[in-house]
Image (tube, grey):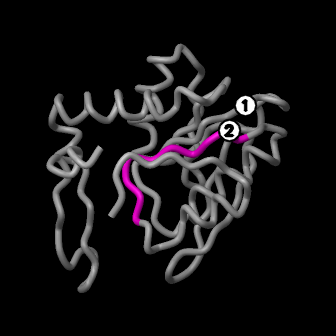
Amino acid sequence: MEELKKYIRNIPDFPKKGIVFRDITTLLANPDGMGLVISGLTKSLAKYNFDVICGIDARGFIFGALLANKYKKPFVPIRKKGKLPFETISQSYQLEYGEAEVEIHKDAIIAGQKVLIVDDLIATGGTAVAGVQLIRRLGGQVECCSFVIGLTELQGIVALKELEINVEVLVSY
């Protein structure tokens, strides 16, 4: 899937000096690039069996909802704290400078359901790990975490594998 890189804009020194930001807005704006993403995700997920697709706030909603439609599966959002209207459970995780929380509705996952978690990018893995913890607390089983982009030097993939989670990444940096 190295071909995907031509659709991803690299922005040096954002959000701070020394970081190269992988901007997917150029990918989202290109139907050919999005076609590659959906076909790549579909191919990489063929070996998994899942009942529900969860997307992580916010760009995971885009890819997760497209996959849910393609597979005819329910879509469940994992949102930043305070954004869901019904009863939730939350999970905190560490940021570079501080802490954040994500939430899911208490009734979003039925115990025993197999779940696919989708996001656009995995870096340190904090949000994805928090998502796995939420699913497990509701009695779900995470079959796989799937990402368009993996920033391998930031060890998020390793953090998920330490939790015995299957990880699929279309393109790595």
Task: Determine whether 142 is above or below 122 in the image.
Answer: above
Question: Quadrant of the rendered structure where residue 37 is?
Answer: top left
Instruction: Give whichever of discs 2 and 1 has the lower sequence position.
Output: 1
Please provide percent x and percent y for residue 17: 24, 85
In the rendered view of the protein, which quadrant contains the C terminus? Answer: bottom left
Please provide percent x and percent y for residue 137: 82, 48
Task: Determine whether 97 is above or below 30 in the image.
Answer: below
Question: Quadrant of the rendered structure where residue 99 is?
Answer: bottom right
In the rendered view of the protein, which quadrant contains the N terminus? Answer: top left
Please provide percent x and percent y for residue 77: 56, 38
- Secondary-structure class at tag 1: strand
Name the residue type under label 1. Lys
The reply, left or right, for residue 169 in relation to residue 173 is right
Please give the name of the residue rendered at 58% of the width and 29% of the height, measured from the top-left corner.
47
Q: In the displayed orientation, state which residue is furthest to the top.
A: 72
Please provide percent x and percent y for residue 61: 45, 38
Query: Can you identify the residue that label 2 sits on?
Result: 143
- Secondary-structure class at tag 2: strand
Q: Depth check: 24 or 58 in front?
A: 24
Majority secondary structure of magenta residues? strand
Q: Tell me if label 2 and label 1 are in contact, CB under 8 Å.
A: yes
Span highlighted in magenta in the image: 142-151
Please give the name of the residue rendered at 21% of the width and 51% of the height, measured from the top-left corner.
5
Number of the label disc, if any, that sits on residue 114: 1
Please give the name of the residue rendered at 74% of the width and 32% of the height, measured from the top-left corner.
109
The reply, left or right, for residue 120 in relation to residue 47 is left
* 10 Å crowding of disc 2: few (<14), some (14-19), many (20+): many
Name the residue type under label 2. Glu
